[in-house]
Image: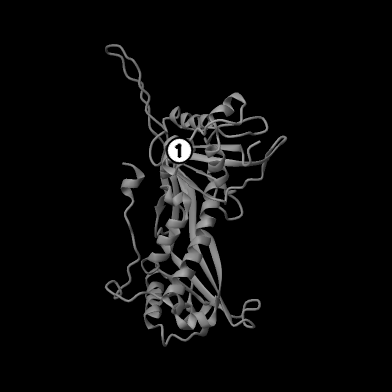
Amino acid sequence: KDLESKIVSRKVTLPGLEDEKQTFSFFKACYAIKNNDWSNAGFEKEVFDNTRKKTMATGTGSAGGYIVPTIYIAELIEMLVAESVVISMGATVLNNLQGSPVQIPRQSGGATAYWVGENIAITASDLALEQINLTPKKVGALVKLSNTLIKLSNPSAEALVRRDIAGALARKVDIAALRGLGASYEPKGVNLQTGLNTVAIGAAGGNVTFDHLIDMEYELAKDNALRGKLGYIFHPAIRRNLLKRKVAQYSGDTGGSYIVAPVTEQVFQNWLGYPYKMTTQIPINLTKTSGKDLTEIYFGNWQELIVGQWGGMEIMASQETSDAFEKDQTWVRILQELDISVRHGESFCLINDAAAVEA
């Protein structure tokens, strides 16, 4: 069966708290951690205590770190999913992983068929399987909060802070998934995967056309990988350049009608043929020989991108960092352990020499 059919939605369950209807308050938790005063955060303390008992987490109250299980940060997780372009494009998310490494099988070779004569044995061929390993890597976000704001525990302000945290983590996930170096505790991105397909625009790069996007689709098709949750991810500059393409430009004339006409989102999507997402995380200052101000375009089956998450998030709060005490602030650090990998590099194609600004 496909990996997706084996993934079961999992949540952290805590003894005695499964039916609790109260809402976990991020602000109350931060205030209590900072001041070691849990008088107004009894529910939050119970969540932390039960999480430690159940998971034997390394983050302890005495060290200032408290693990919030996934079930009580559901809103934050949902925001992260909404903010991350790779996840919203269909990346496979594995939650609440345990142990390290987590091994996921992938097929590297298939059966071979032969023509055979009567009474002649068929040559045997075996399926070849490999493992991809997910190992926890820490990604963090640092938020500076006014102590007055924390004391007030304003729900709308808390939602704003959660969105800010989710956005920061999502941007880190995106850049690692697309361009991670695979070193210095960072996952390896799509652009460095073995077997990755590529399409080159020119010796020094150049203007992207719909022809190049068709070539990207063909690269997956010839590898029998044109399936799944297909789509593009690129910088907003690419959308602008494609929308400005004109029919006459193919003959050297800059005038004439737009190719995408009328210039609407639906028509543009129809021309692409697949969904797309944009992110400014992709650089627009790449170079290739004499070419400069170049950028990247990613196309692929995003279901083949695996994002693994270990447990919940660790909250640490302090007002003694830098000038936080002087400004009556609390600095809150959120840590999440995750890893990113690709099951098959052939499921993706990359252009890395598209002009961000049309020549």
Query: Residue at the spot x=52%, y=83% of the render?
Result: 148
Identify the image quadrant of residue 311. Answer: bottom left
Percent x, y of residue 182:
58, 49
Identify the image quadrant of residue 205. Answer: top right
Residue 134 in view here = no
Residue annotated with mark 1: 262
Percent x, y of residue 167:
50, 61
Quadrant housing the N terminus: top left
Query: Residue at the spot x=33%, y=51% of the render?
Result: 7
Q: Which of 329 and 18 is in front in this view?
A: 329
Of the residues shown, which amino acid type is indicated by label 1?
A: Pro
Q: Which of 200 and 101 is in front in this view?
A: 200
Percent x, y of residue 5:
31, 46
Residue 123 in view here = yes
Crowd tier of the residue under label 1, counting other residues whose Cα lies within 10 Å: few below 14, some 14–19, many 20 or above? few
Q: How many marks?
A: 1
Query: Residue at the spot x=37%, y=71% of the render?
Result: 54
Q: Which of 123 and 259 is in front in this view?
A: 259
Q: Is mark 1 on a helix, strand or loop?
A: loop
Toward the right, the furthest residue is 290
Toward the top, the furthest residue is 117
Does residue 121 appear left or right of residue 221 in this picture? Answer: left
Quadrant housing the C terminus: top right
Identify the image quadrant of residue 74. Answer: bottom left
How are the colours assigned in the image?
one colour
Residue 211 vertical placement versus 315 (above, below): above
Percent x, y of residue 304:
43, 43
Query: Residue at the spot x=44%, y=80% of the render?
Result: 153
